[in-house]
Image (cartoon, rainbow, N blue to C red):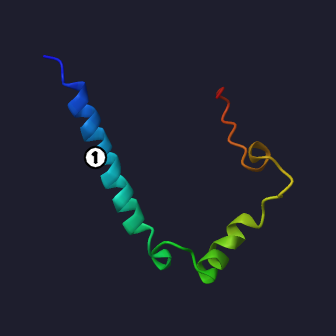
Amino acid sequence: MEPNRGKLKVLVMALKEIVEELESEVYSDPDQYAKTTEAVAAIAPAFSAVDPTQTYDEAFSDDEGYSD
């Protein structure tokens, strides 16, 4: 028994609309997700040791001996 593709397409479109509604509700209040200056300042020291001229691979060497 093969599923009805037309009904599945309608279902997928409805699910996409629901996700869009949820995203708009979540992101409508930037105070809930935007980082404050204090929060950014608190994590800034963790990145201060990274040289901005380096590539990701140079800065964060994760060479454990295995090919990626």
Q: Is residue 16 left or right of residue 43?
A: left
Q: Residue at x 45, y 68 (%)?
A: 27
Q: Is residue 41 above or below residue 56?
A: below
The percent position of residue 13, horizontal first and vertical second, equals 32, 42
Query: Which quarter of the figure is the N terminus placed in?
Result: top left
Q: Nearer the viewer, residue 5 or 54?
A: 5
Examine the image and state in which quarter residue 52 appears. Answer: bottom right
Q: Is residue 46 left or right of residue 32?
A: right
Residue closest to the far left: 1
Residue closest to the far bottom: 38
Q: Residue at x 72, y 48 (%)?
A: 60
Query: Which quarter of the figure is the C terminus placed in?
Result: top right
Reading the image, the residue beneath label 1 is 14
The percent position of residue 50, horizontal first and vertical second, equals 78, 59
As shown in the figure, which amino acid type bears the numbered disc 1?
Ala
Q: Residue at x 78, y 63 (%)?
A: 49
The percent position of residue 61, horizontal first and vertical second, equals 73, 44
Q: Residue at x 18, y 23 (%)?
A: 3
Residue closest to the far right: 53
Q: Is residue 62 left or right of residue 28?
A: right
Examine the image and state in which quarter residue 20 appears. Answer: bottom left
